[in-house]
Image (cartoon, grey):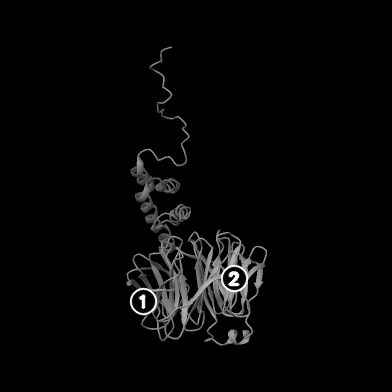
């Protein structure tokens, strides 16, 4: 039967009809229509328009970021909410941290310095180690202690949450390395047992056997530990067996930090006060690849590779954070702003944001690409009041934590 020309066909648009559109469908009129709705005098219309901006790629994203500066608090909150749901998009984390970081929680169960902090892979749990050897497992959302892990007798210098979602690795200045099932509290394996001279190791800061850093490869199979005495040991994490070790040559006196590239092939080591250089090594052979220029004002206190392995970031007693192209030896940026020693570093999951903690009591976030400061968390507190000993950033990049000399952990979020 022929169609009635006066009736709409099934594929015609009908004015006044109720059409259910897909949640991710672009709005009729494109980004221009969204912009018109964003200047509407009706707040609710503007808020609804903000939710449509990210359907239009980079231009829409930039528009949402711009509305973080809107005069209306409701609009700023709406823009923040849209961006919080998409932290993986380029520039979003920087925009959110620039906008308004908030101090959410204070966690207080340690006595003395909080020396190491790590997140679980899903970001729901936090692990903190202290100067007395105690490791606390926290429910981050509730701010409650789940359990305490006790094995070490002095400073926990490193904490690493492995990719299997249940393994935690801890390294201590007491010369021990422990592998934990943090969900049960069981110590699964000890890679280094207590030596007979444990009292000396625990109290003498220049003891050559002191573990100063522990790091693992991206696949979670290989663990590397470094001692103050310049011994690098490579371990099979699954079996707990030592694969090999070697002594790094060229540093004066002792080393302070190590970092492993994501591919597990390259090791960086930082030198002490009389050295201050950063050396790059081929991990399997122990061969030195190159030496980076020294930090001019003090020993290297923190080292970390970016997730792509192309860039190395270092912190120092000279109050600076430096960004390096380690393959060429070029210093890309020197980040200046802390009023005292830089004590710790962390990187966001995309490698775009550097988090630095300092003896001055502040935590700073930096843009790795430009070298610009994004924001400062906390306030300058004088030389000894609230020294920041450790920092980290959550896997989604939306939470930053710091641990200080008074046993306090502060949690900031966007």
**Viewer-nearest residue: 26 or 359:** 359
| In this rendering, the label closer to the viewer, 2 or 1 | 1
Instruction: Report helix, strand or loop for mark 1.
Output: strand
Residue 170: x, y in percent?
58, 71
**Viewer-nearest residue: 112 or 222:** 222
Q: Residues within 10 Å of mark 2 (few under 14, many from 20)?
A: some
**Viewer-nearest residue: 400 or 239:** 239
Q: Which residue is pictured at 33% across the width and 72% down the height?
A: 329
Residue 318: x, y in percent?
39, 81
Residue 286: x, y in percent?
44, 73
Q: Which residue is pictured at 50% across the width and 71% down the height?
A: 391
- Disc count in the image? 2
Q: Earlier in the sequence, mark 2 or mark 1?
A: 2
Do residues under tags 2 and 1 come within 8 Å of each other at their CB atoms? no
Whether residue 362 is visible, yes or no, is no
Quarter residue 87 falls in:
bottom left
Mark pair 2, 1: CA separation: 40 Å
Residue 2: x, y in percent?
41, 13
Looking at the image, residue 4 lies above or below residue 26: above
Which residue is under mark 2?
107
Q: Which mark is residue 291?
A: 1
Q: Is residue 44 left or right of residue 183?
A: left
Whether residue 77 is visible, yes or no, is yes
Q: Which mark is residue 345?
A: none
Please identify the residue farthest to the top as the structure is shown: 1
Looking at the image, residue 171 lies above or below residue 254: above
Quarter in which the N terminus is drawn: top left
Looking at the image, residue 38 lies above or below residue 252: above
Q: Residues within 10 Å of mark 1 (few under 14, many from 20)?
A: some
């Amino acid at each position: 039967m022929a169609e009635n020309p006066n009736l709409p066909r099934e594929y015609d648009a009908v004015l006044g009809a109720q059409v259910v559109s897909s949640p991710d469908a672009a709005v009729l009129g494109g980004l221009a229509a969204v912009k018109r709705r964003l200047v509407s005098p009706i707040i609710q219309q503007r808020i609804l328009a903000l939710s449509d901006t990210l359907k239009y790629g980079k231009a829409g994203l930039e528009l949402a970021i711009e509305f973080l500066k809107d005069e209306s608090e409701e609009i700023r909150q709406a823009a923040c909410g849209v961006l919080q749901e998409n932290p993986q998009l380029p520039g979003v984390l920087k925009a959110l941290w620039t906008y308004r970081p908030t101090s959410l929680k204070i966690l207080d169960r340690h006595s003395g310095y909080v020396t190491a902090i790590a997140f679980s892979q899903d970001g729901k749990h936090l692990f903190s180690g202290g100067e007395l050897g105690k490791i606390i497992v926290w429910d981050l959302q509730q701010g409650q202690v789940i359990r305490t892990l006790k094995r070490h007798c002095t400073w926990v210098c490193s904490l690493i949450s492995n990719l299997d979602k249940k393994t935690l690795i801890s390294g201590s200045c007491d010369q021990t390395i422990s592998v934990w099932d943090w969900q049960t509290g069981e110590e699964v394996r000890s890679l280094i047992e207590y030596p007979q001279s444990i009292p000396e190791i625990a109290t003498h800061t220049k003891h050559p056997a002191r573990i100063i850093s522990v790091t693992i490869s991206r696949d979670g199979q290989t663990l590397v530990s470094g001692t103050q005495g310049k011994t690098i040991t490579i371990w099979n994490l699954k079996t707990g067996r030592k694969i090999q070790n070697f002594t790094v040559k060229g540093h004066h006196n002792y080393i302070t930090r190590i970092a492993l590239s994501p591919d597990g092939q390259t090791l960086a080591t930082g030198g002490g006060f009389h050295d201050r250089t950063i050396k790059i090594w081929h991990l399997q052979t122990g061969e030195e690849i190159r030496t980076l220029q020294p930090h001019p004002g003090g020993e290297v206190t923190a080292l970390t590779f970016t997730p792509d392995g192309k860039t190395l970031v270092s912190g120092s007693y000279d109050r600076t954070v430096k960004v390096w192209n380690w393959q060429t030896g070029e210093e890309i940026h020197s980040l200046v702003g802390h009023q005292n020693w830089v004590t710790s570093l962390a990187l966001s999951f995309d490698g775009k944001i550097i988090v630095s903690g300092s003896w001055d009591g502040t935590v700073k976030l930096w843009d790795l690409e430009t070298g610009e400061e994004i924001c400062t968390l906390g306030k300058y507190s004088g030389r000894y009041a609230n020294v920041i000993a450790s920092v980290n950033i959550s896997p989604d990049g939306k939470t930053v934590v710091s641990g200080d000399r008074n046993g306090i952990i502060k949690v900031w979020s966007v």
